Amino acid sequence: MAAFFIGLAWFVSTRQAVLFLVGIGMGGVLAGARFGFTTGWRRLIEQRDPRGVMAQLLLLGIAAAVSMPLLAAFPGDLGAALGPPSFSLLIGAFVFGAAMQIADGCGSGTLYKAGLGIPLNMAILPMFALGSFMGSAQLEQWLSLGALKPVGLVTQFGPWEALGLTLLGLAALGWAALRWSGKSAPWFDRRLFIGAVLLAVLAVLNLLIAGQPWGVVYGFGLWFAKIATATGVFDPAANPFWSQPVNLTTLSQSVFMDVTSITNIGILAGALWIAAGKRTASAVPASLTAKQWAVGIAAGFLLGYSSRLAFGCNIGAMVSGISTGSIHGWIWVPLAFCGSLIGVRVRRHFGFH
């Protein structure tokens, strides 16, 4: 990690090197605190345990409280994670919610669990990248079904009004989670709440350093797009998504110039660091059957494809979308949760633990 950091600072840029450190922090917190977005939702659904979801709401609230005023103060330098309300968003979010429960990981979850050395997630990672690339290559056809212009609350109402609406929405979600769980269910978990605060700080640092919110999915698609282009099986100039000037430029540059790729690599490294320091028998997953491997890998492909259609995963659409005031983040959450209701049953059917 030290050698990679020095290499980035020397050959690429100081900004990319610092972003790598931010990614290491993200991976370390996700793996160290076992801060799983997928697991938090599943425990709420199956066990009526709201602690993971309440920690996620705290993360969103803190990130929004800092990010929204920053976006208003520096509109030319910082951008929000905006996505268009569309049929592709509705379908993608629902499918992603189901697939992440089957695959036991969203975008960040797949990264940090692959970094921890969990075999299924290591196998899912390249399939996630393939799915993300395929989704991006076909995104224009999905958007042609119907899409509206992206809506940003900060631009529409101002930072403080946007923050007030966001906090009200998060409070409503928290109230619903507690009602679902019952009065006697504990809602506070010190480890998860510390993880939420640290992740919020790191997400804001990502926004300040990169000039854009924390994302995961774009980096995955870029990796496979580079492979497909280099091998001659894909012509980016003939594709509506990859022929866009910003995407074409990113595709032509070194992968180490892409801010999303650098934080993704950092998350892998941070989780690997945690894994190297905490070797416990409980961390070793049970062996899977051939059918479970097939189902898990198929779910990994769907994760990538659907997240591109939905303009992000739990990070890009939910955390970054909501904390920077994008309406599409608020549409994503209920659709993905409904998908998770299906996904946990499919997961149980195939005997995943």
Image (cartoon, grey):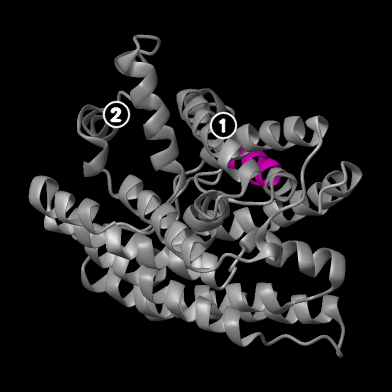
Q: Residue at x 33, y 25 (%)?
A: 226
For mark 2, give the secondary structure: loop
Task: Check whether the beta carbons of the residues at disc 2 and disc 1 lie within 8 A of each other.
Answer: no
* Residue 110: percent from left, percent from top: 56, 49
117 shown above or below 164: above
Residue 188 is situated, as x and y percent measured from the top left of the image, at 68, 87
Which residue has dot 1 on it?
127
Mark 2 belongs to which amino acid? Gln
Between 203 and 85, the one lying in front of the other is 203
**Tag 1: amino acid:** Met
Magenta part, dominant SS: helix
Q: Decide whether residue 93 is among the magenta residues.
A: yes
Mark identifier at residue 223: none
* Depth order, front residue of 28/206: 28
Considering the image in quadrants, where does the C terminus appear? bottom right
- Residue most toward the top? 232
- Position of 290 with respect to 231 (left or right) is right
Q: Tell which of 219 and 86 is nearer to you.
A: 219
Q: Residue at x 17, y 50 (%)?
A: 8
| Magenta-colored span | 87-96
**On screen, residue 332 above or below 145:** below
Q: Which residue is mark 2?
A: 244
Q: Residue at x 20, y 32 (%)?
A: 253
Q: CA distance from mark 2 to mark 1?
A: 24 Å
